[in-house]
Amino acid sequence: MAIIIQPTHQITIIAAGIIRDALIQKPNLVLGLATGSSSIGLYKHLVRMHNTEGLDFSKVKTFNLDEYVEIPCDHPQSYHTFMAKHFFNHVNIPKENQHIPQNTIFNHESFCTVYEEEIKRTGGIDIQVLGIGTDGHIAFNEAGSSLASRTRIVTLSESTLDANAIYFGGDPNAVPEMAITMGIGTIMEAKQCLLLANGEAKAKAIAKAVEGPISASVPASILQMHPNTTYLIDDTAASKLKEIEYYKRSYTNTQKLKSL
Ligand code: GLP
């Protein structure tokens, strides 16, 4: 597990650089994508690289982590709308290569099975982008989710409804109560994970995820067992890490080794 602690604007630049390098190596990269404020900067840099450096996404396949159910795809707060606005409308990923969980609860079980099969058929996700909830959730795997869970329909916790109320006029009751999410087991099969976290509100979740025991109560803590996870954390989100100085020194040394 690599821990990179940098100023807020820098973490999305580093994340975009990791994706760019991987895409140059493998033009048909399979990307797992996240929504949320932490990933907006990442998409901005990838769009810039597409426009100014000709970074080519034409063979890329994408799978989003999650989507609310019971709101239409074109709802202003749907994750379909988020992805179109921040990323898909600005790069050349063919529409048929973009996968986002569906918005309806109708037939959700077979949808979830097919979603998992589609991921497998591509050979698996190469890089999975993740955010973290204030309660330590990843995607919409709330505290108490099985660490082996697969793509499924879930009920959102009160803390997630409260945190996401800001996007629904400040009213937690207006936030859809259910969502379809990739499972923790599904996420753990990605070859590489990049978890982005910024802001003080994430400090407790980051400390528990990185330094606490592995537990279903903090779903992100399972990433301690992932063979290739990079945490990209800004200074405030890192503020409760006990070993913060060690992580900073390790990163400096890793950079030193790379430049040799
Ligand atoms: C939502 C998403 C999660 C995301 C989280 C953090 O709950 N379902 O996948 O990690 O928000 O979002 P933000 O980046 O806005 O803090």
Image (cartoon, rainbow, N blue to C red):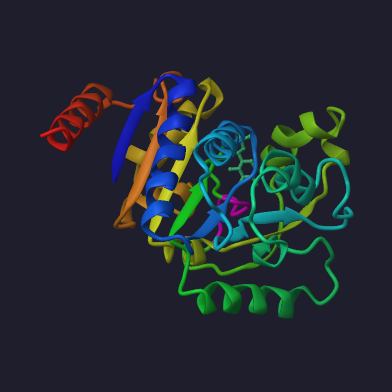
Tell me which corner region of the image, top left, top right, bottom left or bottom right, holds residue 73. Answer: bottom right
In the visual, does 252 lie left or right of 130? left
Whole-percent x, y for residue 34 in the image: 60, 47
| Vertical comparison of 180 with 56: above or below | below
- Identify the image quadrant of the C terminus: top left
Residue 144 magenta-drawn?
yes
Residue drawn at x 54%, y 36% as measured from the top left: 42
Residue drawn at x 54%, y 39% as measured from the top left: 46
Residue drawn at x 45%, y 30% as measured from the top left: 13
Q: Which residues are magenta?
A: 139-145
| Vertical comparison of 17 with 202: above or below | below
Whole-percent x, y for residue 129 in the image: 50, 48
How many marks are shown on the rendered structure?
Answer: 0
Q: Main secondary structure of the magenta part?
A: loop
In the visual, does 211 lie left or right of 76? left
Tell me which corner region of the image, top left, top right, bottom left or bottom right, holds residue 47. Answer: top right
* Residue 208 appearing in the image: no
| Vertical comparison of 126 with 159: above or below | below
Whole-percent x, y for residue 10 in the image: 43, 24
Residue drawn at x 56%, y 69% as measured from the top left: 150
Residue 260 magenta-drawn?
no
Which of 216 and 118 lies nearest the eye of the viewer? 118
